């Protein structure tokens, strides 16, 4: 009920109209496109049911429950922004900050993300993730590539994510992402599960200022970001439906 109330509140907001999104991702960290004093509310939803199994009875896998996330980002100054978030599977709370370095003469943007997470695996536990993002400026105004690389102190492992965005128009994009599984064993002393296959997702993004909508399909419905997807997926070919909704706010 709380998630529904928050969702309706976000949709009801009607602050100033803002420019189109340029950089999209399904789960990757991406260099921020927020400007001074702009903020963003985002809602993510991954259904646990398989989209390619009992399509009629489960309505594309949406009848089997879902993994939901709610986040808020606030640009502060000089490329610095603050973030908070909540994800349902592990009752996870996130608090983070990001700093972007993107001189106009450079062909790429760099961003450093630091995220503190508190979640439940048997008991309340915590993690600190540090991720570096590199992303090129659009090639011929159409193609964007994104790389995430980082480390998480709880999982004691490197996280890696690769993605591409193809801009069909200024408002419509196709997305594809993969998170290579570098190690299918848990070599730490901390309890958590590791999948057997690399996680991946693909989808489409649609901009309708000041909203952004994404529909995606992937093999890892449990996680929302690079740190989680880097733990792998339980299955290689079981596909799950998801969507993201973002709303920019201006003050």
Image (spheres, rainbow, N blue to C red):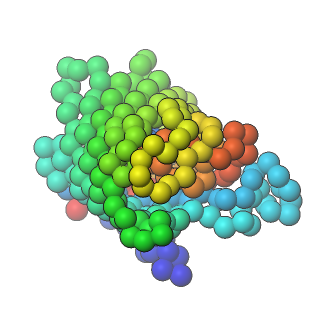
**Which residue is the extreme one toward the left?**
78
Q: Residue at the spot x=73%, y=40% of the render?
A: 237
Where 112 falls versus 45 (above or below)? above
Q: Can residue 135 be seen in this view?
A: yes
Number of labels in the image equals 0
Where 104 falls versus 33 (above or below)? above
Q: Who is closer to the viewer here, 129 or 183?
A: 183
Q: Residue at the spot x=68%, y=50% of the render?
A: 240
Q: Who is closer to the viewer here, 200 or 39?
A: 200
Q: Can residue 11 be seen in this view?
A: no
Residue 43: x and y in percent read 47, 61
Q: Who is closer to the viewer here, 59 or 224?
A: 224
Residue 117: x and y in percent read 34, 60
Residue 90: x and y in percent read 49, 66
Q: Residue at the spot x=28%, y=19% of the render?
A: 107
Q: Is residue 178 left or right of residue 112?
A: right
Q: Residue at the spot x=28%, y=29% of the render?
A: 109
**Which residue is the extreme one toward the front?**
189
Image quadrant where one finds the C terminus: bottom left
Q: Is residue 189 left or right of residue 57?
A: left
Q: In which quarter of the image is residue 102?
A: top left
Residue 82: x and y in percent read 23, 56
Where 113 falls versus 162 (above or below)? below
Q: Who is closer to the viewer here, 231 or 208?
A: 231
């Amino acid at each position: 009920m709380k998630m529904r109330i928050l969702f309706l509140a976000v949709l009801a907001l009607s602050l100033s109209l803002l420019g189109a999104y340029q950089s999209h991702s399904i789960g990757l960290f991406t260099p921020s496109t927020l400007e001074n004093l702009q903020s963003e509310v985002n809602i993510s939803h991954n259904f646990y049911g398989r989209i390619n199994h009992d399509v009629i009875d489960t309505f594309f896998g949406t009848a089997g429950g879902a993994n939901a996330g709610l986040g808020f980002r606030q640009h502060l100054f000089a490329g610095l922004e603050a973030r908070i978030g909540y994800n349902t599977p592990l009752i996870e709370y996130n608090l983070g900050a990001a700093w972007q370095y993107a001189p106009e003469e450079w062909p790429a943007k760099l961003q450093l993300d630091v995220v503190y997470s508190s979640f439940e695996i048997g008991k309340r536990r915590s993690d600190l993730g540090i991720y570096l993002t590199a992303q090129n400026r659009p090639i011929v105004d159409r193609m964007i590539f994104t790389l995430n690389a980082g480390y998480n102190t709880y999982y004691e492992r490197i996280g890696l994510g690769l993605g591409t965005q193809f801009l069909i128009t200024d408002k419509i994009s196709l997305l594809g992402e993969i998170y290579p599984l570098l190690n299918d064993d848990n070599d730490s002393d901390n309890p958590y599960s590791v999948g057997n296959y690399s996680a991946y997702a693909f989808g489409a993004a649609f901009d309708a200022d000041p909203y952004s909508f994404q529909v995606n399909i992937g093999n890892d419905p449990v996680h929302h970001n690079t740190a989680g997807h880097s733990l792998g997926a339980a299955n290689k070919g079981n596909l799950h439906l998801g969507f993201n909704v973002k709303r920019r706010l201006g003050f």
